[in-house]
Amino acid sequence: MTKKTDVIIIGAGPVGLFAVFELGLLDLKCHLIDILDRPGGQCAELYPEKPIYDIPAWPSISAQGLVDKLMEQIAPFHPEFTFNRMVSSLEKLEDGGYRVTTDEGETIEAKGIVIAAGGGSFQPKRPPMPGIEAYEGKSVFYSVRRMEDFRGHDLLIVGGGDSALDWTLNLQPIANSLTLVHRRPEFRAAPDSVNKMYALHERKELGFEVGQVTALTGTDGQLESATVKGPDGPVEIRCTRLLPFFGLTMKLGPIAEWGLNLHENLIPVDTEKFETSIPGVFAIGDINWYPGKLKLILSGFHEAALMAQAAKRIANPGERIVFQYTTSSTNLQKKLGVA
């Protein structure tokens, strides 16, 4: 079934989230699509605990703290989210609106599109394991879309960041067996998660190996075991599913095929509406380009505010837009639930 909304936002990072607020003040409903499994973009995925010092009124706030505050701020507008999806195609409709299709075949229609995808879509880094391509999508996966898909399997998780530790703790109760592999005993993950993992290891409820996966064994794309080279020599570990978490890279992805004008892999926009070369399609945040562009979150917030005014005119042509301040407008305060 095709879903319909006023504005589709591609990317659920801080700028995409704040766009929900600005569009919501103008009575525009939003549906956000992100390739990650939660909101926050780079902030949530790459540096959730690092402090940010240049957000107005916040001398210091963690990246995840900023995301949490933005989610709290947009809650009155009840945005819809679709996670673990990439927008694979954009289609112009006869009524002037747009239809997007995800890599899972879902379709969503809207009057306007906002690209807030940061530097592009996050793509997992392929680890240097010989022959891993033959297993990808069958028994090697770079994300967990449904935990049930891993129930009863012998799992091998490789990595030392938050994603590796989080999924180790979440999947351990439903796995037949689970082994975590990292190249060293120190981790980049939250200390609490590391302590919980070591506690499970001490109780022999999961395996932990220091080393690197050097070989995979299996037939027809189905893993049977992996060879881990550690300080004491190679170890053979039985596994039917492998989850490597080696970080992410950013690519423009299918957006590059939509017919947009591009400037060094970024999307040029005007500085009045932040509209792209395609009418009704906007780009805000790090993914856009214009003379004097600064890649700052606060710059993206400013772009979202101006974009929202233009998107309103497209969504409701002919309707008079009255500029209002949240500090004095009882109408806006009612929308925010603070009147």
Image (cartoon, rainbow, N blue to C red):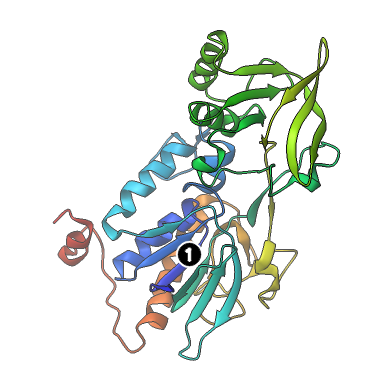
**Residue 293 at least partly seen:** no
- Secondary structure beneath dot 1 equals strand
Determine whether, in the image, residue 179 is placed left or right of residue 39. Answer: right
Q: Residue at x 66, y 29 (%)?
A: 156
Please state which of residues 71 and 283 is positioned toward the viewer in this rendering: 71
Query: Residue 329 at what x, y percent from top left?
Result: 19, 64
Relative height, residue 64 to residue 92 (above, below)? above
- Picture quarter containing residue 284? bottom right
Residue labelled with disc 1: 9
Query: Residue 221 at what x, y percent from top left?
Result: 76, 46
Query: Residue 79 at what x, y percent from top left?
Result: 35, 60
Q: Residue at x 60, y 55 (%)?
A: 294
Query: Residue 152 at what x, y percent from top left?
Result: 55, 33
Determine whether, in the image, residue 153 is placed left or right of residue 214. Answer: left
Q: From the image, which quarter does the C terminus lie in?
A: bottom left
**Residue 253 at least partly seen:** yes
Q: From the image, which quarter does the N terminus lie in?
A: bottom left
Q: Identify the amino acid type marked 1.
A: Ile
Relative height, residue 17 to residue 226 (above, below)? below
- Picture quarter containing residue 188? top right
Relative height, residue 269 to residue 335 (above, below)? below
Please state which of residues 52 and 193 is positioned toward the viewer in this rendering: 193
Relative height, residue 196 to residue 264 (above, below)? above
Please state which of residues 38 and 154 is positioned toward the viewer in this rendering: 154
Q: Residue at x 48, y 87 (%)?
A: 96
